[in-house]
Image (tube, rainbow, N blue to C red):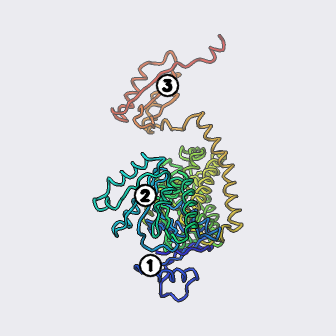
Amino acid sequence: MLLCVKPDPVHSLEEIPVEQEEKSELAGAAFEAAGKLESTRITVYECTGPHLRRAVLNALADLDVKQLILNELFELRSSARSRLVRQIERAAPYDLVSLDVEDSPRKPNRILVTQAGGSGEFAMSYALSTFAAGGTPTLVIPDPKATKKSARAVKKIQDHLNEKLQDSLQIMPAAESIDTALEETVMAGDLVLFDAADGRKVKHLLGHLKSLLEAKPDLDFAIGITRAAHAAGPGTIERAMERFHMRVPKLNRDERRDLYEQLEKGGRLSVDFMIMLMVSSAIAALGLIQNSTAVVIGGMLVAPLMTPLLAAGMALVQGNTQMMRISSRAMVIGITGALVSSMLIGLLSPWDDLSTQIVARGGPNIFDLGIAFLSGIAAAYALARPGLTGTLVGVAVAVALVPPLASAGIALVKFEFQIALGAAVLFITNFLAIVLGAALVFRFFGMDISLKGNQAPAWVRVTTILLIVALVPTTAVLWENLQLQKHEGVHRPYARPLPPPVREAILVRVRQERGADIVFMAESDIEHGFGVDVVIAVQPDTHPRIRQDIETTIHQLMGEHVPRRVTLVQAANLNETGKK
């Protein structure tokens, strides 16, 4: 396989058929070079992209390359080309061989593996697996300054060889230095291999071998640098990033087109979109008013608001003005309609106080920002991977776009402006974080196909900056809420009202006693809770039998299994206390 690489604003990877009449100059040269080879048919691919290093590595991942061979160690006349080859040599997470073959024969007579620093395990494995079957011997030149390490490396290879391959592996006697051993051993037609384990030793050996070739022009031998895939990258972080990038699934052209069409269609304003969004907001509002978690979740699942947000993220990475305009229109009108729908439900509600579901959404904290950002990433990733679309339901529940919007509408009509502001902050946080998270994923999937070179259109940069800047005040509010919640503790509803028959029966009994009054009566709302608690303020002359009567009433109306606790507290007489 031959890979032809050239810069272009558009990412592409295309197989070039040999019968294709119109070919680029580079592809034509590749076919001409392939025609001179006597081996099996070679496939030619043309790879383009604004960032050549990334384009090449992505293409190699798509083609499932296991081994990468680079030629011309010494003949890189272009600085840009030289830089690209060096970057790929360092970063490519594949078994790699860099070669300079000059006029050497295609099949080497011998393989000389130099153990600079005592390494060379991968070079030996490569030589034996590639050439030993053809009868080519492999000669190992140990490093006299690291004899024990060199011996351990050889033994490690020998332990995994059969008898035939062990005969192909020969250990040279230690010389004064590797340089001296090479000068005495290398012959025309040899291939000198060494591992890229130590950059300084590699540079020294390359310099020495180049000097040897210049001093003896008739001594034609090839030079190769091998590197195992796990040793990719000049540092641990870059190595890990490249291997992660290689393993993350990529989208082919058809998948990218399908994803674009899906978002372009789903992000448009339509009658269906508005009806579903307003209905979902009404359902969520009804669930919030009744404090019903199940109904609120139902409203989340019906809402189609996620798609325009993902389309906006796509528009950002593609610089697609039309898609951004379409999705923005759908979001603005849709959000307004959902807000109006929830306000109407709030006006129809007979209760003036807000449920705990609404109050909870009035106090978001910094963790809600993390939830929204990760939900945007999950939604974009699931949408891009056809097999994961079923998880979008879970994402919709996790991010909860409509409930905070509905909470803000209900709180507004109930004149609870502090709760309305908190719910609005939560919705804005979700909105911004989802768009930015989706844009990050789509860029990672290579959807930025319309960006011109390395520069995004001006409006993309301005919009991205505005979105990030808009997160600053919301993040400040979320952080302040978190500090307040740390001081006050997490809000957990403790109790719920008793059933009306029980409440009425207790009230009737308490009214029979002069001076008695109910301080508190409720049922624990905590799982495995404490049952029913009743606290009654009594006077000294209150009959003590009131405790037993109330316990009996609870037992008769709620069942024997319900724990009950009736507490009598002495009420102070303020008038008498003041006189004293």
In the drawing, what numbered circle is on residue 70? none
At x 60% / y 53%, what residue is drawn?
Answer: 427
Residue type pointed to by label 3: Ile
Point out the image quarter for the C terminus: top right
In the drawing, what numbered circle is on residue 122? 2
Can you say whether 478 is above or below 2 in the image?
A: above
- Quadrant of residue 23 within the rendered picture: bottom right
User: Where residue 368 appears, x then y in whole percent?
Assistant: 57, 48
User: Where residue 132 appears, x then y in whole percent?
Assistant: 35, 65
Of mark 1 and mark 3, the one earlier in the sequence is 1
- Does 309 sit left or right of 147 as displayed? right
Write down the residue under mark 3. 536
Write down the residue under mark 1. 42
Q: Residues within 10 Å of mark 1 (few under 14, many from 20)?
A: some
Q: How far apart are marks 1 and 2 (CA)?
A: 26 Å
Q: How far apart are marks 1 and 3 (CA)?
A: 92 Å
Circle 2: element type: helix
Can you say whether 472 is above or below 228 in the image?
A: above
Is there CB contact under 8 Å for labels 1 and 2? no
At x 40% / y 25%, what residue is drawn?
Answer: 549
Circle 3: element type: strand
Can you say whether 509 is above or below 458 in the image?
A: above
Of mark 1 and mark 2, the one earlier in the sequence is 1
